[in-house]
Structure formats: C-alpha cells, structure tokens
Image (cartoon, rainbow, N blue to C red):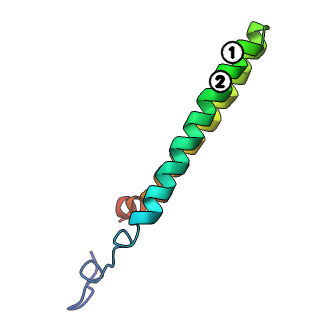
Amino acid sequence: MRYEGSNPSLCTRVSSRVDAGPERSRVLVRLYMAMIAFVVLGAAAWMTLTDQRLRLITLAILAMFAVKTWVRRKEIVRPDRESDVEQ
C-alpha cells in the first residue's frame, strides 16, 4: 500500500454516474431494441429456413451477436466496475 498524503485518491473520486441517468436509459432502450431484433431475426430464420443445419448455424450466429451485445452493454453502463477490480 502506498502513502497518498492527506488527500487520498479514494476520497476525491468523482462519480460519473451522477449525470448518467438519461444516457443510461438510452443505452438500456437500445439494448432492449437490439434484443427484440435478435429474437425477431431468430424467429424469421426458424420459420423460413428449411435446412436444419443452416437454421442452427444462423441461430448460433445470432446468439453470438446477442451475447456480444449484452457484454458490451455491461461495459458501457458500468465502466467504473473494471477500475474497482484492478485496484
């Protein structure tokens, strides 16, 4: 542990979440819209594709994009979580 004087960085940390209310809600709306789009695309692929193998490959690709979208959402909504883990 290092000495930081009488004003350690933990005491002077400014939270970016105070102003993040409207921005966070916009991110969540976009996340929900993206997830609905993935579900609609998956349903359309399931109903229109006749080859079982091609259908499953398409659903797997859509699932990978959905997971990537969900993980990226966590990075955007809670950016300070990573810095807490590193310390």
Q: Secondary structure at mark 1?
A: helix
Q: Amino acid at mark 2?
A: Gly
Q: In this view of the protein, can residue 20 be seen by the observer?
A: yes
Farthest left residue in view:
6
Looking at the rendered structure, the number of numbered marks drawn on it comes to 2
Provide residue 3's location: percent of width, then percent of height. 25, 84
Q: Amino acid at mark 1?
A: Trp
Q: Which quadrant is the C terminus positioned in? A: bottom left
> Is 49 left, or right, of 37 in this rendering?
right
* Discs 1, 2 touching: Cβ within 8 Å: yes
Q: Residue at x 56, y 37 (%)?
A: 35
63 above or below 46? below
Q: Quadrant of residue 65?
A: top right
Q: Residue at x 33, y 79 (%)?
A: 14
Q: CA distance from mark 1 to mark 2?
A: 6 Å
> Is 63 left, or right, of 57 in this rendering?
left
Toward the viewer: 10 or 34?
Answer: 34
Q: Secondary structure at mark 2?
A: helix
Q: Residue at x 64, y 20 (%)?
A: 43
Q: Residue at x 20, y 91 (%)?
A: 6
Q: Mark 1 sits on what residue?
A: 46
Q: Which quadrant is the N terminus positioned in? A: bottom left
Q: In this view of the protein, can residue 67 be seen by the observer?
A: no
Residue 42's mark? 2
Q: Residues within 10 Å of mark 2 (few under 14, many from 20)?
A: many
Provide residue 32's location: percent of width, then percent of height. 51, 42
Provide residue 46's location: percent of width, then percent of height. 68, 15
